[in-house]
Image (tube, rainbow, N blue to C red):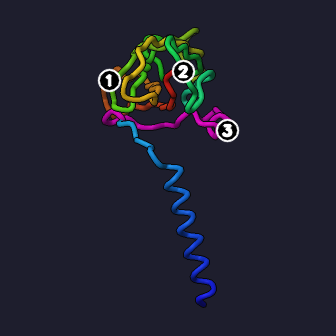
Amino acid sequence: MKKIVVPTIIILVTIVLIALIFDWGRKDIPLPDGVEIIATNSTEQNSSSTSDMPIVVDNIKDNQEVSSPLKIKGRARGNWFFEASFPVELVDIDGNVLAREPAQALSDWMTTDFVNFSVTLNYTKSTSTNHALLVLSKDNPSGNPEFDQSIFIPVILK
């Protein structure tokens, strides 16, 4: 019995240490109150079908290095737009908004299908960190928090 317990404990401790090493220095970025995370733009999401996703960013991937001006292109379901736009923000790790602009529909947005959009964010690099979140939010003219939805893409500022 001792011959099995000692190697098992060593393996478990090794797994925990590896997990801690890979998570070392990670700092969670605070999210606005009432915002629901739909997904990030991870490779897992991009490799799966986009039919269930309300929004897809085509040119920015998780942890991609970006610089100002940051041009964002993608597709969003028509119900993400209100009056042909939805809000986009770049937020640093301390929760400071570095840039905020509306993404504009590039065609008729009065549909449940995907609609191409684009937006350009101009920002000044944060002094506290190079890490930021790109936040694309469903436009919610009602202001009712239960209808808030967002997608978050971690980026690295150059």
Left or right: where does residue 75 sit relative to residue 128? right
Instruction: Give the spatial CA distance, label 3 vs label 2.
Output: 24 Å
Left or right: where does residue 99 sit relative to residue 44? left
Find out whether the residues at labels 1 and 3 contact each other: C-beta distance under 8 Å. Answer: no
* 1 vs 3, front mark: 3
Residue at the spot x=62%, y=84% of the render? 4
Residue at the spot x=55%, y=76% of the render? 9
Q: Position of residue 135 (x, y in %)?
A: 45, 26
Mark 1: few/some/many CA within 10 Å (<14, 14-19, 20+): few
Q: Position of residue 122 (x, y in %)?
A: 45, 11
Can residue 27 be seen by looking at this rendering?
yes
Can residue 109 be seen by looking at this rendering?
no
Q: Mark 2 or mark 3, which is nearer the start of the sequence?
A: 3
Q: Is residue 79 above or below residue 45?
A: above
* 3 vs 2, front mark: 2
In the picture of the structure, the residue carrying the numbered disc 2 is 66
Q: Mark 1 or mark 2, which is nearer the start of the sequence?
A: 2
Specify the label residue 156 is tagged with. Answer: none
Location of the N terminus (image quadrant) = bottom right
Which quadrant of the structure image shows residue 126?
A: top left
Give the amino acid type for the residue marked by disc 2 in the picture.
Val
What range is drawn magenta here? Answer: 31-53
Q: Position of residue 18 (x, y in %)?
A: 55, 57
Magenta stretch containing residue 34, yes or no? Answer: yes
Q: Nearer the viewer, residue 25 or 108?
A: 25
Give the amino acid type for the residue marked by disc 3 in the picture.
Ser
In the picture of the structure, the residue carrying the numbered disc 1 is 142
Give the amino acid type for the residue marked by disc 1 in the picture.
Ser
Which secondary structure lies at badge 2?
Answer: strand
Specify the label residue 48 is tagged with. Answer: 3
